[in-house]
Image (cartoon, rainbow, N blue to C red):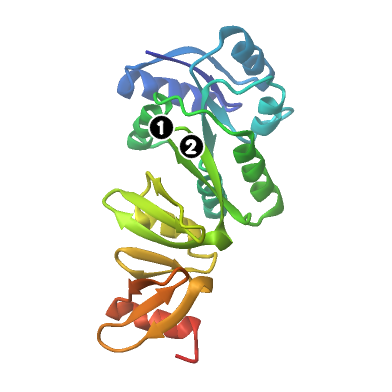
């Protein structure tokens, strides 16, 4: 059983979340729900929940300010937000879990499933997310969660991504690789505006790491590290758009 505290300044939202958890997530026990972030902060300190659902934008004390006042974040955290598409990509860059208002039951259940794994939050994830939301730009890194925590990968060092069923392998210039529990399509949504291109159903590449392009029916790219990546026929035009000289 996971104990949870809900914090949202909108009464309807916090009540609906509590109802959905009771109906669809029987493994969660809602200890308390608050529309006052100050009261919610005190409850986190005194009651030490396993899981906190936290609204981002609240008067007097927003979600980030609330977290700053805690000595440690020793619980699973799910942000609840009504942000736009840019901000959703910001959450994905930082690998922090979120629910988009109005709440979706399937996504709520998935968030609870992840919370049960008790993956500890790295303060740098919060710093990365706050920077993006404040400055309106993406950072030069992406947070990649793994079983032992989170690794922060420089995008300039990410050569390509390869689909592996419902996972994605990330390959770096130093020869290291990481397995990300996201589909390649999900990774594409995050990186497509950062000079990455899906050239094949199996591959998403960093355009800065292309060394050679071999044209023809069996077109392929040679990437940094001498790795060959096939180019699907229906993606050749996109390469031409990126490199007018092709």
Residue under numbered circle 1:
111
- Looking at the figure, which quarter contains the N terminus? top left
> Who is closer to the viewer here, 224 or 11?
224
Side of 22 relative to 145 (left or right): left
Vertical placement of residue 127 versus 43, above or below: below
* Residue name at image x 71 percent, y 30 percent: 65
> Which element carries disc 2, helix, strand or loop?
loop
Binning the other alpha carbons within 10 Å of mark 2 as few (below 14), some (14 to 19) or many (20 upward) gives some
Instruction: Measure the C-alpha gap from mark 2 to mark 1.
Output: 7 Å
Which x, y percent locates residue 81? 54, 38
* Residue name at image x 49 percent, y 85 percent: 243
**Do the numbered discs 2 and 1 sit on residues whose CB atoms are within 8 Å?**
yes
Which residue is at the far bottom?
245
- Residue 96 visible here: no
Which x, y percent locates residue 115? 43, 27
Side of 189 relative to 71 (left or right): left
> Who is closer to the viewer here, 190 or 221?
221
Residue under numbered circle 2:
97
Which residue is at the far right?
60
- Residue 59 visible here: yes
């Amino acid at each position: 059983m996971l104990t949870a505290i809900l914090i949202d300044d909108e009464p309807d939202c916090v009540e609906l979340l509590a109802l959905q958890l009771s109906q669809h997530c029987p493994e969660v026990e809602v200890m308390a729900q608050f529309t006052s972030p100050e009261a919610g902060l005190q409850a986190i300190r005194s009651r030490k929940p396993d899981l906190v659902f936290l609204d981002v934008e609240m008067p007097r004390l927003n979600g980030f300010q609330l977290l700053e006042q805690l000595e440690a974040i020793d619980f699973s955290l799910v942000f609840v937000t009504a942000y736009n598409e840019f901000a959703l990509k910001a959450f994905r860059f930082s690998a922090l879990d979120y629910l988009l208002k109005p709440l979706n039951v399937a996504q709520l259940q998935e968030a609870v499933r992840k919370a049960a794994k008790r993956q500890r939050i790295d303060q740098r994830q919060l710093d990365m997310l706050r920077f993006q939301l404040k400055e309106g730009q993406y950072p030069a890194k992406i947070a990649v969660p793994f079983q032992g925590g989170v690794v922060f990968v420089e995008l300039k060092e990410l050569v390509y991504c390869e689909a592996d069923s419902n996972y994605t392998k990330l390959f770096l210039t130093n020869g290291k690789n990481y397995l990300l529990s996201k589909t390649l399509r999900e990774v594409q949504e995050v990186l497509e505006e950062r000079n990455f291109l899906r050239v094949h159903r199996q591959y998403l590449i960093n355009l800065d790491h292309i060394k050679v392009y071999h044209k023809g029916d069996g077109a392929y790219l040679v990437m940094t590290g001498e790795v060959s990546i096939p180019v699907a026929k229906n993606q050749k035009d996109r390469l031409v758009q990126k490199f007018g000289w092709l």
